[in-house]
Image (tube, coloured by chain):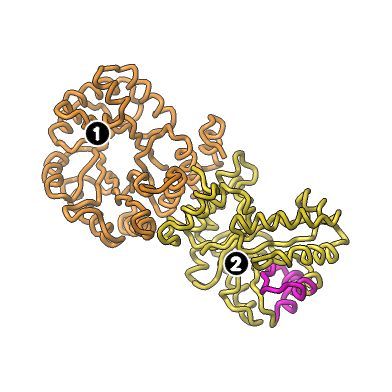
Chain colours: A orange, B yellow
Amino acid sequence: MFEVIGERINTSRKFVQAAVAERNSDYIIDDVKKQQEAGADFIDVNAGARIGHETEDMKWLLDTIQPIATIPLTLDSPDPAVLEMAFKRVKTTPMINSISLEKERFNAMMPFLEGKECKVIALCMDDAGMPASSDDILGRAKNLVKELNRIGIPTASIYVDPLVQPISVESTKGIMVLNAIRAIKTEFPEVHITGGLSNISYGLPQRKIINRTFVSLMMAAGMDSAIIDPLDSKIMGAIRTADMLLGNDDYCMNYLKGVRSGAIES
Amino acid sequence: MFEVIGERINTSRKFVQAAVAERNSDYIIDDVKKQQEAGADFIDVNAGARIGHETEDMKWLLDTIQPIATIPLTLDSPDPAVLEMAFKRVKTTPMINSISLEKERFNAMMPFLEGKECKVIALCMDDAGMPASSDDILGRAKNLVKELNRIGIPTASIYVDPLVQPISVESTKGIMVLNAIRAIKTEFPEVHITGGLSNISYGLPQRKIINRTFVSLMMAAGMDSAIIDPLDSKIMGAIRTADMLLGNDDYCMNYLKGVRSGAIES
């Protein structure tokens, strides 16, 4: 089954930032409930945008969301101290967003993750920057899996993000990621592949059709999770449809459910 | 480059049948021009629906279309006598639609095709019916390529149709065709893969999103042609977008052209 990580609770989004600043819990609760109803499998919580307030904002968000959450949370911060506090407050095994191979981030995250029971998003980013080829992405994924296995995180708990780059920059950027996903899944059948989608369409018009088409291509290559807005019914419809076409929807049950609820339209 | 075979000139379509019955050449000319403007690479011409009139209807259609056609025609009939007449009337190397492994059709088509310079659609159908597995599709494709090569049709002129079947019947019907396409392209890198799409969604609601999503999955597997309605801007948009994402559109030129002409919408 494809897993949707709902990206909406992020203080870089204007209305969320205002709700957090005003401690408007109704707004947050309503948004989380909507994401859950739309089929999210995780709720990402990011409180990084109000500089100097991340710890208290994250704390308040978790205390607000925890009582009504029916699905696990994705704790989204580069700061291990914030994550340590957050980890203690959640009641279900969380997902951590994220570790990368950038030295500073890597060195800060590894001691935090060691011995913890959690899922973790592993970005194929290092100090040289974005990956330059399919092989480069695969090499970084191998490093991340090896290091995380070493500190006790099993491969099946790792969500590799191959880092989608804009196709407007170079026409091979799509196929590069698709080939990398296939190679990573061949090397590690148990690993998950996740990521945001919208970078692919950066700089081009009519971005949504690009994002929607690309998610189905990534799913065909082996991507089984994405960080998206679950209230974007067009992208959710594309995901459910592709999931069905790839053989993951017996008797088309999820597809038909999506159509009946109005979430899938032609 | 992906090739679009425009399916509209078919007497099984109500308005086309009426236009043919009334010898309304304006209607036919207008429709063909629209298909060409929308980016069709071939115009399929099928005059089979008015029983007893196929030869004269095909003749009239070709005489009507030929003067304004800027692209080759796909001559669509199961009758070699009709095809023989049609073949002599066209001015550009045509595509023949179609041969299959069904004995009667196979035996009728082989003498017609022998020694002719043409492209040919080869259906993975035999007297046992529709194929039952990816291996079955691959086996039929191998037979078709071998037999067509033997009578002088080069692999690069063959358009294999793996025969898309409804996913409502069995949840593996999508992945079966995707795996078969990949296997056929591995065996014969030069062969083309084509076909209709709409069978995939037979029996399900909101069929267009299924057809659209499936065409991009088939393109990722190696399909490089389809028999569709070029005036269906949503499916044409999906094809142009997938083509770009698969690395076949330098500088996103075709995609941007499609957006500017209004043919691609989010």
Q: Which residue is the site of mark 2?
A: B160
Left-right relation of B80 to A24? right
Q: Provide residue B148's location: percent of width, then percent of height.
A: 64, 77
Looking at the rendering, in which quadrant would you find the C terminus of chain A?
top right
Dot 1: within a 10 Å radius of its alpha carbon, few (fewer than 14), some, or many (20 or more) residues? many
In this picture, which residue range is highlighted in magenta?
B85-114
**Which amino acid, by three-letter code, is at mark 2?**
Val
Figure check: A221 above or below A36: below
Structural distance between the alpha carbons of marks 2 and 1: 49 Å
Q: Nearer the viewer, residue B51 or A18?
A: A18
**Which amino acid, by three-letter code, is at mark 1?**
Leu
Q: Provide residue A71's location: percent of width, then percent of height.
A: 34, 30
Say if mark 2 contacts mark 1, CB within 8 Å.
Answer: no
Is residue A208 found inside the magenta-colored segment of the image? no
> Which chain's residue wears label 1?
A
Dot 2: within a 10 Å radius of its alpha carbon, few (fewer than 14), some, or many (20 or more) residues? many
- At numbered mark 2, what does the secondary structure look like: helix, strand or loop? strand
> Which chain's residue wears label 2?
B
Q: Are marks 2 and 1 on the same chain?
A: no
Left-right relation of A2 to B51? left
Residue A190 in view here: no
Q: Nearer the viewer, residue B1 or B179?
A: B1
Q: Which residue is the site of mark 1?
A: A75
